[in-house]
């Protein structure tokens, strides 16, 4: 039986496919912005937000598909414990890159596996990235290579699509940075013997 990926991310699906994890996509349609605002109002940090969103997505889809294994995932950027959201426009993407410019930040990727509407496993990975000190022209040149829809859906940098050029260094698992800590997922799925 195929595992359900509760994510509209084509990159996450590709990661599962590349690791021979048979899957189908069923989007959770969780209002991420509403959840983030609610959690921020309660004083949640970026790690809490990432974990909660992964769990909510996974459980929402799992409750509608009993007996199926459902993977929910979420990734957020944390700059000095401040949540950096996906941009709502190209201008906002530029502002975010300016904010991250020449600084170290963390990309937090959480994954939750659910069955019968309840979480059965979760994992969170944190990767450290340091942006180069780039000029405004270099930032604008980078952004000009990315379609607006991609920016709004996936965030200000895509490691899998030329985003590495922005960084002085990247410490962490590439798949996790792209949105899915697949090694840990694969190890857990093997234990399930499905």
Image: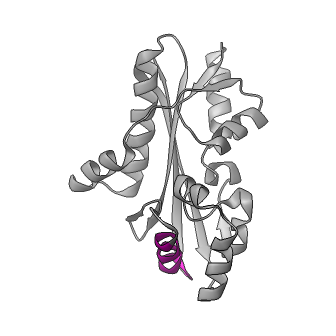
Residue 89 among magenta residues: no
Q: From where the camera sits, is residue 168 visible?
A: no
- Residue 45 relative to residue 130: left or right: left
Q: How many marks?
A: 0
Between residue 71 and residue 91, name the one nearer to us: 91
Q: How is the image coloured?
A: one colour
Which region of the structure is painted magenta?
91-102
Instruction: Give the residue drawn at x 39%, y 34%.
Output: 56
The quadrant in which the C terminus is found is top right
Instruction: Give the residue drawn at x 63%, y 49%.
Output: 176
- Residue 116 relative to residue 186: left or right: left
Quadrant of residue 23 in the image? top right
Instruction: Give the residue drawn at x 49%, y 73%.
Output: 91
Question: Horizontal and vertical percent for residue 81?
Answer: 38, 66
Question: Horizontal and vertical percent for residue 132?
Answer: 64, 81
110 in relation to 77, above or below: above
The quadrant in which the N terminus is found is top right
Question: Horizontal and vertical percent for residue 17?
Answer: 75, 33
Residue 96 among magenta residues: yes
Secondary structure predominantly adopted by residues drawn in magenta: helix
Quadrant of residue 177 in the image? bottom right
Question: Horizontal and vertical percent for residue 75?
Answer: 51, 51
Q: From where the camera sits, is residue 86 visible?
A: yes
168 in relation to 178, above or below: below
């Amino acid at each position: 039986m195929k595992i359900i990926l509760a994510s509209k991310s084509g990159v996450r699906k590709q990661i599962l496919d590349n690791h021979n994890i048979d899957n189908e996509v069923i989007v959770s349609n969780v209002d991420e912005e509403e959840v983030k605002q609610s959690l921020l109002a309660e004083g949640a940090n970026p790690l809490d937000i990432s974990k909660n969103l992964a769990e909510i997505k996974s459980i929402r889809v799992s409750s509608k598909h009993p007996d199926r294994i459902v993977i929910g995932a979420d990734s957020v950027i944390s700059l000095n414990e401040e949540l950096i959201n996906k941009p709502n426009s190209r201008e906002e993407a530029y502002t975010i890159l300016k904010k991250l410019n020449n600084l170290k930040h963390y990309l937090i990727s959480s994954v939750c596996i659910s069955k019968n509407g309840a979480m059965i496993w979760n994992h969170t990975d944190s990767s450290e990235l340091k942006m180069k000190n780039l000029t405004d022209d270099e930032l604008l040149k980078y952004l000009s290579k990315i379609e607006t829809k991609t920016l709004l859906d996936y965030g200000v940098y895509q490691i899998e699509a030329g985003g590495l050029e922005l960084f002085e260094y990247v410490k962490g698992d590439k798949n996790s940075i792209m949105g899915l800590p697949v090694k840990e997922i694969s190890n857990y799925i093997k234990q399930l013997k499905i």
